[in-house]
Image (tube, grey):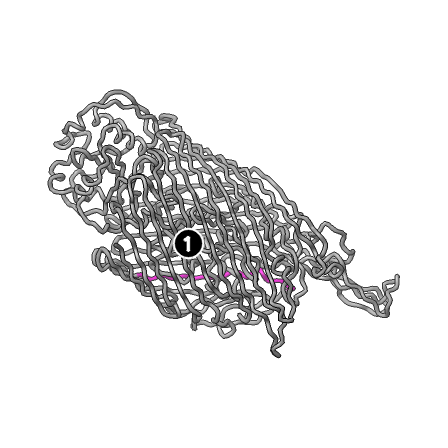
Amino acid sequence: MDYPRGICRKLVSGDMTLGRRRSDLAQKLAATALSGCLLAFIPQGALAGADVGADAVAGVSHGPSGGELAQSSRFDQSFRFDIPAQKLALGLVEYSKITGIDVVVDGSLSTNRLTAAFAGDMTARQALDRLLSGSGLTWQALDSNTVSIVAVHVDSSISSVVTAPVTITAYAAGSAGTNVDPEAVYETPGGLSVVTREDMQKVPGREARDIFGQVAGVDVSNDARDPGLTVNVRGQQEMGRVNVNIDGARQNYNQTTHGTTSRVYVDPALLANVTIDKTNMNQSGGAGTSAGIVTLRTLNTDDILDPGEDWGGKVNLSHGTNNYNFAGDASVAARVSPKLDIAAAMSRKTIGNYRAGSRNPELFTLSSGKEYTTENSRPEYTFSRQTSGLLKANIQLTDDQELHLGYVGSTVDYAKTSDVTNLYTDFNETQTHTLTAKHNWNPASELIDLDTNLYWTRTKNHQNRPARYNSSGRVTTDSFSTDYTLDTAGADIANSSDWYLGNLAGGSSSIQFDYGTEFFQDKAKTDSSTGGEGGSGEDYQLEGSTPGGKRDVYGGFLKTTYDWDEMFQVYGGLRYDRYQLDGNAYWCDTAHPCTSGGVPYDVDLADQKVSPSFGASVTPFEGIQFFANYRKNMRAPTIAEAMIKGEHIGNVGIPFYANGNLQSEESETKEIGVNFKFDDVLQKHDRFRAKFTYYRTKIDNYVTLGYVPQPTTDVSCMPSPCTPSYIGRTIKTNQAAAMVNLTDPVYINGSEFELNYDAEIYYLSGTMTLNDVDLKGDYNPFVLNTAYDEYANYQLEEIKPANLFNLTGPFYGNGGTLYGIYAPPKRKITLDGGLRFFDQDLVLGMRATFVEPQDNFGSSNLSTVVGKYFRYRVFDFYSSYKINDHVAVRLAVNNLLDEAYVQGSGGTYAASPGRTGILTLSGNF
């Protein structure tokens, strides 16, 4: 549902907890009247059973039939109206401003329907009837200055009353950011998921990755030792394929290691909600993105204060077993004036080395067939210490302009190891800083709803890599001190324009244009120094594997949507994307070693593309919506992909090559699905929601790491010197690694199922995700713009004395020489159910997760890496008890059966935490 912004404060619909200050509806409405500028969307169904007080009940009347309250002078007074054709919500705001009558709308009702324009002198009663004509809605007077909008079929008798959690406030500035009602998931014709703060709090996780555990089509590839997020959406991850942003600011940080490369650092304690859009790339944030947009919205005033509060705060304190030592956060906010509100929050978490599960200790097998268990996966160095904070200010500049300023920052200390036996550990201190400035201009016009966003973010990781020793105590690799830094600055501007086309075939007809442009720039820099302990290791090795450079990405979009009577929608859109990436690189081989500077290699890449999208949805019956979507996208290579150089750290002897010929990925996604949304199914006031989606994605020029040949080969002869006859000659090809484009298309097919049933005293929900991925393919291994030895890509098969050598080939350029491709699980099923007691003050619930991983496509015939992860199942228990309006306590037990498992998306060798109990005390003031 689209709500009017910049005109009046509103309370968005949805299930809400009871406010701290209880009073009946009449008192709340009277206390918060805005002198003709109130449009409030209250919790679903609240009006049907609202306690409006005895006096109000006696005088309630319905608009068309009149009544004691509706006969007041205010309703019969004449006003001059000039209300244009627009959405009903905006029309009601105009009506309220003209008449001084406050309007309350039940949040479960749709106010997206367009109204016809009307002008002239008429009574407030007549004008409201005109506004609601044909909408399926009517009105009733709550008092002499307030009306409620209800469905026509609502029983006019409200003698059976229940106090509703309704509070309406006059402050004008709203919280910025994506604040999607979870109900929108089942009203959106495409892939959309929402994780609420309640979802995150009921089963507190060890790291941010845990908040995605119940989301269909989404997984996280890195393990619990790394607090960074690597989000996989529908089989795609890393390198910008998924735009993960904090309050609209892109988080593009990359650091090359064994395992996943792209990471986002955020503290879950500061999050208000998470929105995952898997379909619509024709919006701000779609530039250079192919899989989805994940928006991490942080806390703001409306998330901290209950409606009607001028100031207040919330506190959470947690302690648990399995070295879950402490987690605490405090947030405060104040509505300083109708023009200004501010918010701040702080969080601290310290967790120690965890113990892995003991049940079913088998974790994975290597490609060689060797099996690893929890005995091979040490839990040492799995600690982390995180301190985070935010500061927000929301300013109402004018009646139709808002400005939102924000800062979010975090520092986290942690250790990470990425080898199979967890012997080699790096110690990290990662800092993130994000600044945002958002402006909205929404005048009383259907043609303008303009959003502007400016942002800057820095992620800097200081890594201390201790020296490596052999069994005799000799230093094999020197220590390293390295700073990895990525700065991203960006801006986007977007507008939405609506036109009412009048009635067509008995239904209202409208068209909407969404259009905008965006830009962002990445600047990467790596500084490294060695400790000089006498082992191998050079500065350029780590500086080259996570290279410096600059990348500019531009984008623009236009989306046109036609709607007929909220039953049929069809849209078409275009995206224009362009990027430019440049920097200085070099390449090394046996003839040109890196220690001598190698061979200079300048990389200057640019590309542009126009990508179409279109789709349609139809709602043949109330509560059922069918939809289909199609889109193409271009993903620009990142600095880390195009500019990698130097060589592998230690004595591995594998150089990395930049690829000046790297092409953009081009993807095509087809999607079909259906939404179900029904109320009062098995009993009164219950709710059933469901979404089923099937998608198929084809990706051309897929970019991944592959082994490639060095330009020169090593030649030796027996006897020496070599003779022109090649008799006795031995040729040895030399190996390097580079990011390459697959010449074969990559296909990802998947199905997503979501079910949700809530009967108030009990609830049950579940998801199932099925994935079928084909991420292997051939590629061109000659990535350098230089001459190659004629035998550079051939493998020696055997040497026959006194005969010519025999070679097999080509050796590089096939699926067996790819490395580091990670895939989501083949099948993932989640279940969540519980009971509510004592007027829902006590909640008891269980959660279950069943995972069957893919074979890890990181396997290669040149490297011993994970071949297959074992399937696993995890059960979690959670509970909460609301002691009073100010204090609540929660108890959760994660991994209740102490299952041993490795996260099923690849990119890690470490077992996940075993059974962990967490007790949380929450308070508000």
Q: Position of residue 154 (x, y in %)?
A: 21, 39
Of all residues, the one furthest to the top in this rendering is: 120
Quick check: is 871 in the magenta stretch? no
Q: Is residue 606 visible?
A: yes
In this orientation, which residue lies closer to the viewer: 910 or 546?
546
Q: Secondary structure at mark 1?
A: loop
Q: Is residue 125 above or below residue 923?
A: above
Q: Residues within 10 Å of mark 1 (few under 14, many from 20)?
A: many
Identify the residue shown where x is 35% and y is 33%: 400
Quadrant of the rendered image containing residue 622: top left
In the image, taking residue 793 as reference, residue 696 lies left or right, namely left
Marks counted in the figure total 1
Of all residues, the one furthest to the bottom in this rendering is: 472
Write down the residue under mark 1.
215
Amino acid under disc 1: Val
Name the quarter where the N terminus is drawn: top left
The segment highlighted magenta reads 845-862
In the image, taking residue 73 as reference, residue 682 lies left or right, namely right
Q: Is residue 756 above or below residue 916?
A: above
Name the quarter where the C terminus is drawn: bottom left
Identify the residue shown where x is 76% and y is 64%: 732
Q: Is residue 904 visible?
A: no
Q: Position of residue 56 (x, y in %)?
A: 13, 39
In this orientation, which residue lies closer to the viewer: 580 or 571?
580
Quick check: is 849 in the magenta stretch? yes
